């Protein structure tokens, strides 16, 4: 059994067998195309309904030379190359006779050409959950350098559903997942992780996915070592315009942090209700936000998008002594409320010339709470992208963020100011080789007594290249120019089909 991940193809030779839930098919050679949702069986083909047929005149088994089925439509065609050829239509597990003259029968008898390619994995058995994953048993997975990794079980996921794509594993600067178990709606995996305190370690996660309704993910990391963390994430789509989520984090020696959020879309906007809890700290917030809309239907202002947001919330904290800039010989209120407002405006991508686009945005936020504390935050961004040719893209951006904090009860106000400049170079050659180089410079200043820390310079590089036709390797690393004693960051690496 060979698996070609780039094509999502399973190819079995020699006593091949497939059970698609409707029919059982055995043949000398079976090719399963998961992308097109069809398979082709060739040589000594035997087709048997998965459910025994009891109707008078029903066919219990039929033989032929070629059988193709579109398992999304549960429709197939069996051809026996006798003289003359004999054909049987198989519809929803029921074996019939010759197809009518108007029937379209050629399409199920085709699969993509993958001749000459090296398979991503070779296995004794495979279970494919269509649209989700492929579980391979007694498998050898291809590695760089013409080597392979033998595993008792390996799961390759290809669904774009967020339940398969995201990870809630805690605290790992590097994470290489190895999924080993799956069902129609779940996946289990071991994660090889790197963390500064434990160096190399193991993590585990369990996913339950109900596409397109939602998903639940539980993870534990590290399995061995200090500060074990259990994370739980639940996402649920209640209906077409309402969704809810729950996250919980339990950290060894610290405690559990819980957060709940529900959003309901209402006429080009949404309402959001959130709640959080950590020991005696409680928080609740009700917010309304409009979706991004054009300032005008036509004319120059149609290139400007905006949204508005308002929120009101309440917070409960344990008994807390005053902290800077409040006096330290008082206790702050345990209950306090806040209100907040936001106005955001941004341009659509504006063409400055051939291959050159500009994006600009401005965000203004204001908060007031009953400590009392007033905060005003503005963020102004400008980005320019230049597509040099079909391989090379350049981009650069500036972000300017002034902040003002006011404390009326002590008649104090503090200004802070942050800036960031970024530049990127991206080269992509048809998926065979890609290089991303990024650089950033940041500054920050504040009048707050606690001060601020900003990383001044960072450059990073990320390179991905194809080792062979079925395997790619990605490597990345950052450099911090000795800021706070740090020069090189951790090397990141990932394997892709």
Image (tube, rainbow, N blue to C red):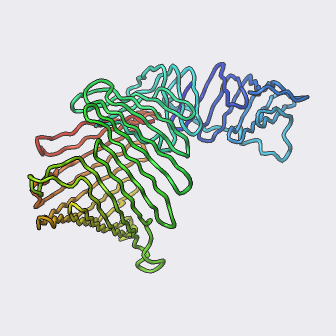
Front residue of 445 and 466? 445
Q: Total label count?
A: 0
Residue 76, how many percent across, how many down? Answer: 75, 36
Asked if residue 211 lies left or right of residue 173, the reply is right
Residue 280, how many percent across, how many down? Answer: 28, 44
Residue displayed at 47% across by 22% down: 140
Residue 494, how many percent across, how many down? Answer: 36, 35
Asked if residue 85 lies left or right of residue 244, the reply is right
Residue displayed at 85% across by 31% down: 86
Res. 409 in view: yes
Q: Quadrant of the C terminus?
A: top left
Residue displayed at 49% across by 58% down: 264
Residue 61, how many percent across, how many down? Answer: 81, 24
Q: Is residue 230 above or below residue 212?
A: above
Res. 456 in view: no
Q: Residue furthest right?
A: 56
Asked if residue 470 lies left or right of residue 404, the reply is right
Q: Is residue 159 above or below residue 357?
A: above
Front residue of 7 and 347? 347
Q: Is residue 259 above or below residue 64?
A: below
Residue displayed at 23% across by 43% down: 478
Residue 13 position by quadrant: top right
Front residue of 81 and 490? 490
Q: Quadrant of the N terminus?
A: top right
């Amino acid at each position: 059994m060979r698996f070609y991940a780039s094509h999502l193809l399973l190819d079995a030779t020699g006593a091949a067998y497939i059970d698609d839930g409707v029919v059982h098919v055995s043949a000398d050679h079976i090719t399963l195309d998961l992308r097109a949702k069809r398979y082709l069986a060739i040589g000594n083909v035997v087709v048997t309904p998965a459910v025994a047929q009891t109707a008078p005149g029903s066919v219990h088994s039929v033989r032929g030379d070629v059988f193709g089925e579109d398992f999304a439509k549960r429709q197939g065609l069996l051809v026996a190359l006798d003289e003359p050829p004999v054909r049987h239509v198989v519809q929803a597990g029921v074996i019939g006779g010759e197809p009518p003259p108007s029937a379209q029968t050629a399409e199920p008898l085709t699969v993509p050409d993958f001749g000459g390619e090296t398979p991503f994995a070779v296995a004794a058995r495979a279970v494919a959950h269509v649209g989700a994953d492929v579980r391979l048993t007694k498998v050898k997975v291809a590695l760089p350098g013409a080597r392979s990794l033998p595993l008792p079980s390996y799961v390759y996921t290809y669904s774009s559903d967020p339940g398969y794509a995201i990870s809630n594993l805690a605290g790992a600067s590097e994470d290489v997942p190895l999924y080993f178990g799956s069902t129609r709606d779940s996946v289990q995996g071991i994660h090889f992780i790197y963390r500064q305190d434990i160096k190399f370690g193991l993590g585990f996660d369990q996913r339950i996915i109900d596409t397109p309704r939602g998903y639940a993910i539980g993870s534990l990391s590290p399995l061995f070592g200090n500060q074990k963390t259990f994370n739980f994430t639940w996402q649920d789509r209640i209906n077409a315009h309402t969704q809810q989520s729950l996250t919980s984090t339990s950290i060894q020696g610290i405690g559990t942090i819980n957060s709940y959020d529900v959003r309901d879309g209402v006429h080009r906007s949404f309402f959001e209700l959130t709640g959080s809890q950590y020991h005696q700290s409680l928080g609740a917030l009700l917010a309304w936000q409009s979706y991004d809309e054009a300032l005008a239907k036509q004319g120059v202002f149609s290139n400007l998008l905006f949204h508005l947001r308002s929120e009101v919330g309440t917070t409960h904290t344990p008994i807390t002594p005053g902290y800077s800039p409040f006096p330290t010989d008082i206790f702050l209120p345990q209950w306090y409320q806040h209100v907040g407002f936001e106005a955001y405006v941004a341009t659509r991508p504006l063409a400055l010339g051939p291959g050159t686009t500009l994006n600009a945005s401005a965000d203004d936020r204001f908060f007031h709470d009953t400590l009392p504390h007033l905060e005003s935050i503005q963020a102004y961004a400008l980005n320019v992208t230049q597509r040099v040719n079909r391989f090379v893209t350049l981009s650069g951006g500036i972000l300017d963020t002034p902040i003002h904090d006011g404390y009326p009860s002590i008649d104090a106000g503090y200004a802070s100011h942050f800036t960031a400049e970024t530049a990127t170079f991206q080269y992509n050659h048809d998926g065979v080789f890609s290089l991303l180089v990024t650089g950033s410079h940041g500054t920050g200043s504040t009048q707050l007594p606690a001060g601020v820390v900003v990383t001044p310079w960072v450059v990073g590089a990320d390179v991905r290249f194809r080792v062979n036709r079925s395997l790619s390797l990605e490597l990345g690393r950052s450099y911090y120019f000795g800021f706070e004693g740090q020069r090189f960051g951790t090397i990141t690496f990932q394997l892709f089909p």
